[in-house]
């Protein structure tokens, strides 16, 4: 098997374990609010992906990030912080149990880490030189 196929299999296994932890954190205690964490972590990389190509042209010598790129990074970071804080707030207000909070945070971290690893491993550089 090639290295790319092994990577895809490993990433899919880690993603499945992450979703399993999130679903178990909901199903074991019959409270489905932690399922929103999966949605938050799936949506988290979208602003960074959408704004990563804004403000960059072929003739600019500025290698620093532009305003839209920084705004996309800000939205992504706020979404990730929300994904980690949401189960903590639910556990603090006693809507979910602390064990469900921990399972949801670990599962969400695995889901988001898998998305980041997939984009890092399979990134295609468009520059020819």
Image: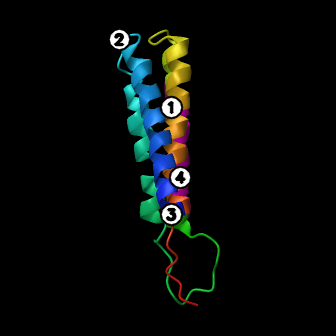
- In front of the other: 33 or 99: 99
Residue located beneath label 3 in the image: 2
Q: Mark 2 or 3, which is nearer the eye?
A: 3
Q: Outermost residue toward the front?
A: 1
Q: Residues within 10 Å of mark 4 (few under 14, many from 20)?
A: few
Q: Secondary structure at mark 3?
A: loop
CA gap between label 2 and label 4 equals: 30 Å
Q: Which residues are magenta?
A: 70-86
Residue 15: percent from left, percent from top = 46, 41
- Which label sits on residue 30? 2
CA gap between label 4 and label 3 equals: 21 Å
CA gap between label 1 and label 2 equals: 17 Å
Residue 60, by quadrant, is bottom right
Q: Residue at x 55, y 60 (%)?
A: 120
Q: Earlier in the sequence, mark 2 or mark 4?
A: 2
Q: Mark 1 or 3, which is nearer the eye?
A: 3
- Which label sits on residue 107? 1
Q: Residue at x 52, y 76 (%)?
A: 125
Residue 103 position (above or below residue 72)? above
Q: Earlier in the sequence, mark 1 or mark 4?
A: 1
Please say if the residues under marks 2 and 3 sit with CB atoms less than 8 Å apart. Answer: no
Residue located beneath label 4 in the image: 116
CA gap between label 1 and label 3 equals: 28 Å
Please say if the residues under marks 2 and 4 sit with CB atoms less than 8 Å apart. Answer: no
């Amino acid at each position: 098997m090639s290295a790319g196929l092994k990577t895809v299999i490993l990433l899919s296994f880690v993603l499945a374990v992450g979703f399993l932890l999130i679903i178990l954190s909901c199903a074991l205690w019959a409270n489905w609010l932690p399922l929103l964490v999966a949605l938050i972590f799936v949506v988290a990389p979208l602003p960074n992906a959408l704004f990563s190509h804004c403000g960059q042209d072929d003739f600019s010598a500025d290698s620093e990030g532009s305003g839209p790129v920084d705004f996309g990074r800000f939205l992504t970071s706020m979404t990730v912080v929300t994904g980690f804080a949401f189960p903590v707030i639910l556990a603090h207000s006693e809507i979910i149990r602390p064990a469900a909070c921990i399972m949801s945070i670990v599962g969400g971290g695995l889901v988001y880490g898998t998305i980041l690893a997939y984009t890092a491993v399979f990134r295609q550089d468009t520059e020819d030189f």
